[in-house]
């Protein structure tokens, strides 16, 4: 079983990116980066609180983005302790857990997604040692 080290971030789906950013920035979070809208209208932003991040996604009403519900938890992410992302995959297979997306390269490592019993996406991220 992969060794989980910490909660890295939570991803939220929101209906109004501008209002959401305004709220969380007034609450004291720091905006790290934002993007979009993409070709399918999806906007995203990453805010920091302490050592964790809040990732926020929005899509125009009726858009065909990857967001299947307009609001709520999109995913949450655990940092894993492993030598490689391939080791994480082997451990998951041994535990009877299917990888539903990934692995994919990230700016600070690699990540993959699994689903919990209710279908909530759980990201498992292996950080590059140099990236912290």
Image: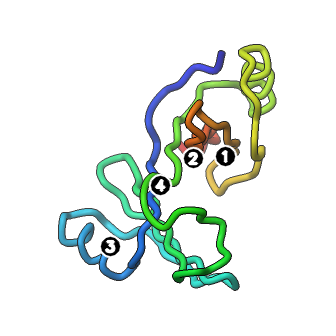
Mark 3 lies on a secondary structure that is helix
Measured along the vertical axis of the image, is residue 28 above or below residue 111?
below
Q: Nearer the viewer, mark 4 or mark 1?
A: 4
Q: Which residue is mark 1?
A: 109
The quadrant holding residue 91 is top right
Closer to us: 46 or 113: 113
Q: Which residue is mark 2?
A: 131
**Quarter of the image containing the N terminus?**
top right
Answer whether labels 1 and 2 touch (C-beta < 8 Å): yes
Answer whether labels 4 and 3 touch (C-beta < 8 Å): no
Mark 1 lies on a secondary structure that is strand
Distance from the alpha carbon under mark 4 to that under mark 3: 13 Å
Q: Earlier in the sequence, mark 2 or mark 4?
A: 4
Measured along the vertical axis of the image, is residue 82 above or below residue 25?
above
Q: Which residue is mark 4?
A: 11
Give the class, few, some or many, for how many residues have Cα within 10 Å of label 1's Cα (few <14, many ≥20): some
Q: Which residue is mark 3?
A: 20
Q: Which mark is residue 55?
A: none
Distance from the alpha carbon under mark 4 to that under mark 1: 18 Å
Q: Nearer the viewer, mark 1 or mark 2?
A: 1
**Residue 13 at x, y percent in the picture:** 46, 63
Distance from the alpha carbon under mark 2 to that under mark 3: 28 Å
Q: Earlier in the sequence, mark 2 or mark 3?
A: 3
Is 101 on the left or on the right of 121, as rendered? right
């Amino acid at each position: 079983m992969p060794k989980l080290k910490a909660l890295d971030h939570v991803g939220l789906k929101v209906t109004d990116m501008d209002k959401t950013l305004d709220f969380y920035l007034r609450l004291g979070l720091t905006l790290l980066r934002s993007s979009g809208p993409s070709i399918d209208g999806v906007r995203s932003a990453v805010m920091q609180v302490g050592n964790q991040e809040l990732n926020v996604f929005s899509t125009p009403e009726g858009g065909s983005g990857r967001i299947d519900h307009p609001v709520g938890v999109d995913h949450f992410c655990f940092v894993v302790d492993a030598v490689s992302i391939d080791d994480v995959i082997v451990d998951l297979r041994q535990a009877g857990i299917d990888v539903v997306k990934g692995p994919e390269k990230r700016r600070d490592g690699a990540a993959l997604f699994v689903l919990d019993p209710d279908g909530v996406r759980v990201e498992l991220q292996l950080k590059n040692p140099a990236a912290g």
